Amino acid sequence: MIHYKSKEEVEIIRTSALLVSKTLGMLAAEIKPGVSPLKLDKLAETFIRDHGGIPGFLGMYDFPNSLCTSVNEQVVHGIPTKKPLENGDIISIDCGVFMNNYYGDHAYTFEVGDVSDEIKQLLRVTHESLELGIAACRVGNRIEDIGHAVQTHAEKHGYGVVRELVGHGLGKSMHEDPQVPNYGRRGRGKKIKEGLVVAIEPMINMGTHRVKHLSDGWSIVTMDGKPSAHFEHDVAVVDGNPVVLSTFDYIYEAIGTPEYVKAFSR
Ligand code: MG
Ligand code: MG
């Protein structure tokens, strides 16, 4: 069942989402070759608690950390390790916050040092896919219109759209109805209504869309070992239109706005 939110609830969720945004902004300044994902995880946990929140992922489904850190071919749900990041890596950091009884949940894929042009394009297209998905999240459309927009753009560039993992409703629970796949057919799925709040999160692979689980029980990696990117925003439908509750602006303040973002307007 979908819980549609009042405007007051949307504002509370915005507060949780923005604490995730600030956490990602804090981490952005720390990400460089030699730094371990586990160190980033500890920094995030301290930062979230210092700002009155509770790490949303820690202990959820028995997940052991505050961040999911997914490096290179890891798609999502990577467990932070002591293995230092290397020049040319990418790392998707997914973070959740629980505050005032509501969750925020969003993610960004960071470049570590100098990455290849091939990877820069993957990041650009994944970010654009997220923006196109957000634009489709409006009254008059249906849920699969979101995924259709994401999938069409990603596949146009020859990339694989992960099927096994999807976006989701967000509120008093981290994962609520409806599921928001990153693929779909135009005009299919539930009608998008006022008060819908969803996390839209394209997971786009450079190669095959197929993925597999690692033996740690959490990490999901691409079947062909090629890199994968992941961007996630929390989006509310207010007055019929999508309102993005989270922001990458704290990240851009820390490390500068990527060219591909400057070139794209919502
Ligand atoms: Mg997330
Ligand atoms: Mg999510």
Image (cartoon, rainbow, N blue to C red):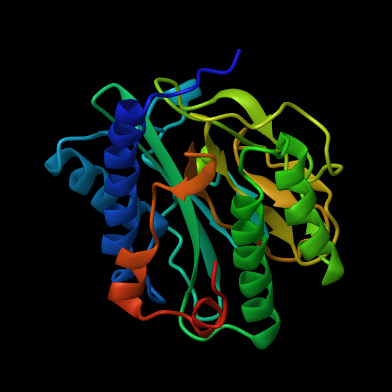
Q: Quadrant of the N terminus?
A: top right
In this rendered view, identify the residue nearer to me: 205 or 139: 139
222 with respect to 3 (left or right): right
Say which quarter of the image contains residue 84.
Answer: bottom left
155 with respect to 243 (left or right): right
Q: Is 220 placed above or below 261 here? A: above
**How many dots with numbers?**
0
Q: Is residue 164 visible?
A: no
Tell me where residue 42 appears, x and y as whole percent: 27, 48
Q: At 66% across and 87% down in the image, what residue appears?
A: 117
Q: At 78% across and 29% down in the image, what residue appears?
A: 189
In this rendered view, identify the residue nearer to me: 185 or 42: 185
In this rendered view, identify the residue nearer to me: 42 or 260: 260
In this rendered view, identify the residue nearer to me: 42 or 265: 265
123 with respect to 225 (left or right): left
Tell me where residue 190 appears, x and y as whole percent: 73, 26
Q: Is 70 placed above or below 182 here? A: below
Say which quarter of the image contains residue 49.
Answer: top left
Q: At 36% across and 33% down in the image, what residue appears?
A: 10
Q: Is 66 placed above or below 30 here? A: above
Tell me where residue 105 appears, x and y as whole percent: 43, 40
130 with respect to 50 (left or right): right
Q: Quadrant of the C terminus?
A: bottom right
Say which quarter of the image contains residue 151.
Answer: bottom right
Q: Is 99 placed above or below 75 here? A: above
Tell me where residue 229 appears, x and y as whole percent: 63, 61
Q: Is residue 218 visible?
A: yes
